[in-house]
């Protein structure tokens, strides 16, 4: 057994957190004392369920006797119901993937992403398919064929219509990705028309696209007519956006901004409801600059992401490090908290960390206080932040390769679509997936962050040798993590309220 983490926020408040029960209680100096003394004096005793304490110590004599006895009884109560201790290893709760699990995931899939072309009209310096990164397929201006897209749709239709489907009435999202997807608008129109003429029974169909925004003026009316959701990539003003150049090295900024302002003026409802933004943080911008640009020019705030640190080529590490900017450090050195306080703190890294924590580390509703301490069956789970194969989406590359999502290295292709054949072997996928998981079990079993892991196993390098997860946390790191989370909650209770009451947290 190990002690449940006891941690203190930057405002001096102390809490006890139990990850097995997913519960937190506020502590104080007396509870802290009993926890510390019990750990020192009673841990080696065989009957540690009924610890004894000397109540005549100088520290305890500072407090009224009835107060000391109250907190001693509270401590014993918490200990009796397993709150101050938790199992030191989570291994027995771990689960592996079966082909049945994957089949069920496919039958309930709610997002299909087509890479309609791998060609792009920009040459962004930090592009995930660019010179910084390993593990990508070659970019040869390949386009996805309509026949391949239809084969995928019909393959999935059989699964959606099977008895394994439990999501009738839910939305299925068809997403278009690139490269720059608007460079293959012909295919996009063909797929949309095919789905409108051959709808998915008992499901609603929606469309989305990730775009650099350069070609929006040409196709915006079609996108509006078909209710596309758009995610536009833009890093801020012209200097902030200066890593996003055209193929001939020219700035793309003016064209993109002109297109967006034109849409906001001509189609304000569509702009408000269907367009969102993503900005990449680097050495030519900052959270504060991003905030001012979007707030003043586009009247929206973007999601901000750091540069991807996975798979950097050895010879590019120094150049990459020059471009990289840490989001937390950037926020701490700016006035962005005050700027966002009455707008949207959810764009900040600490708030995103809080959302992950609340999603994974907070128990569901209970009927009364005592019920919190009843033993409940602990469900098994797959360690790491890796999705079950096709648990969230399926990604079809322009070459017809099948991946679980666009963020997974192309070395881990799980199938392919060629001519009249869709090759996807569920047993092989489960076997490969489990092989990697087993290599991580020892690290995951003692990691304090195992229930809110943010590391995908496909992003851990050196698969053929010993793996070292970059996100693994021991007791000290986890206490610092909890302190940061709860300090944010204490400082911005209105944001906590918004997360709990207004934001849909999707697994």
Image: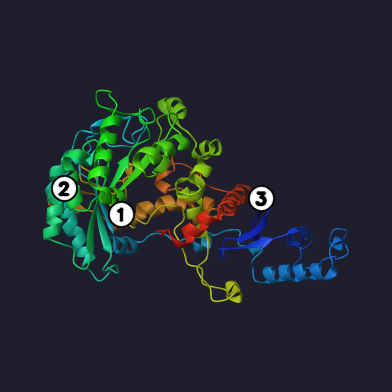
CA distance for labels 2 and 1: 25 Å
Which mark is on residue 469? Answer: none
Q: Of tags 2 and 1, which is closer to the observer? A: 2
Q: Residue at x 27, y 48 (%)?
A: 268
Considering the image in quadrants, where does the N terminus appear? bottom right
Residue 11 numbered tag = 3
Give the image location of residue 382, x and y in percent. Answer: 44, 58
The earlier-in-sequence mark between 1 and 3 is 3
Question: Residue 400 at x, y = what percent?
Answer: 20, 46
Residue that carries the numbered disc 2 in the rendered image: 222
In space, the residues marked 1 and 3 are separated at their CA atoms by 41 Å
Closer to the camera, 185 or 405?
185
Query: Eyeballing the image, is 330 above or below 39?
Result: above
Considering only vertical position in the picture, is 378 above or below 33? below
Q: Mark yes or no: residue 38 visible.
A: yes
Gap between marks 2 and 3 measured at Cα = 53 Å
Residue 214 percent across, percent down from the top left:
24, 35
Labels 1 & 3 near each other (Cβ < 8 A)? no
Label 2 neighbour load within 10 Å: few <14, some 14-19, many 20+: few
Q: Secondary structure at mark 1?
A: loop
Residue at screen point 51% across, 36% down: 330
Residue 261 in the image: state x and y as whole percent: 28, 39
Q: Element at badge 2?
A: helix
Q: Quadrant of the C terminus?
A: bottom left
Name the foreground residue: 252 vs 158: 252
User: Marks 3 and 2: in contact by CB < 8 Å?
Assistant: no
Q: Taking 344 as reference, is 245 above or below it?
A: above
Tag 3 secondary structure? loop
Circle nearer the viewer, 1 or 3 = 3
Q: Residue 393: give its label.
A: 1
Towards the viewer: 143 or 68 = 68
Q: Nearer the viewer, residue 225 or 468?
A: 225
């Amino acid at each position: 057994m190990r002690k449940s983490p006891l941690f203190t926020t930057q405002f001096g408040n102390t809490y006890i957190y139990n990850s097995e029960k997913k519960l937190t209680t506020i502590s104080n100096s007396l509870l802290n004392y009993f926890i510390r003394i019990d750990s020192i004096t009673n841990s080696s005793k065989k009957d540690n369920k009924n610890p004894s304490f000397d109540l005549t110590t100088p520290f305890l004599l500072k407090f009224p006797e009835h107060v000391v006895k109250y907190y001693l009884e509270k401590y014993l109560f918490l200990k009796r119901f397993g709150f101050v201790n938790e199992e030191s290893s989570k291994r027995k709760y771990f689960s592996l993937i079966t082909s049945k699990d994957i089949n069920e995931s496919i039958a309930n899939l709610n997002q299909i992403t087509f890479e309609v072309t791998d060609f792009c009209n920009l040459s962004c310096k930090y592009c995930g398919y660019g010179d910084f990164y390993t593990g990508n397929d070659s970019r040869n201006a390949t386009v996805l064929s309509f026949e391949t897209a239809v084969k995928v749709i019909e393959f999935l239709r059989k699964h959606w219509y099977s008895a394994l489907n439990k999501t009738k009435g839910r939305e299925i999202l068809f997403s278009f990705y690139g490269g720059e997807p608007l460079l293959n608008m012909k295919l996009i129109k063909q797929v949309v028309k095919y789905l409108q003429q051959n709808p998915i029974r008992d499901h609603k169909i929606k469309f989305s696209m990730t775009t650099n925004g350069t070609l929006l003026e040409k196709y915006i009316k079609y996108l509006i007519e078909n209710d596309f959701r758009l995610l536009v990539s833009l890093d801020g003003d012209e200097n902030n956006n200066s890593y996003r150049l055209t193929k001939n090295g020219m700035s793309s900024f003016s064209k993109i901004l002109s297109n967006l302002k034109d849409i906001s003026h001509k189609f304000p409802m569509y702009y408000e409801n269907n367009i969102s933004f993503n900005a990449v943080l680097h050495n030519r911008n900052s959270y504060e600059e991003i905030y001012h640009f979007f707030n003043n020019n586009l009247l929206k705030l973007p999601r901000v992401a750091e540069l991807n640190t996975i798979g950097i080529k050895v010879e590019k590490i120094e150049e990459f490090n020059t471009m990289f900017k840490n989001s937390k450090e950037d926020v701490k050195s700016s006035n962005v908290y005050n700027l966002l306080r009455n707008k949207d703190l959810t764009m900040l890294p600490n708030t995103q960390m809080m959302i992950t924590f609340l999603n994974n580390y907070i128990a569901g509703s209970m009927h009364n206080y005592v019920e919190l301490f009843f033993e409940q069956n602990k469900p098994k789970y797959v360690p790491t932040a890796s999705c079950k194969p096709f648990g969230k989406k399926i990604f079809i590359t322009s070459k017809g390769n099948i991946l679980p999502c666009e963020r997974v290295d192309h070395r881990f292709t799980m199938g392919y679509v060629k001519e009249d054949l869709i090759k996807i072997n569920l047993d092989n996928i489960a076997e490969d997936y489990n092989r990697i998981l087993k290599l991580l079990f020892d690290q995951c079993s003692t990691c304090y962050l195992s229930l809110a892991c943010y590391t995908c196993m496909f992003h851990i390098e050196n698969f053929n040798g010993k793996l070292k997860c970059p996100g693994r946390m021991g007791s000290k790191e986890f206490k610092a993590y909890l302190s940061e989370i709860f300090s944010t909650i204490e400082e911005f209770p209105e944001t906590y309220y918004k997360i709990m009451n207004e934001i849909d947290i999707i697994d």
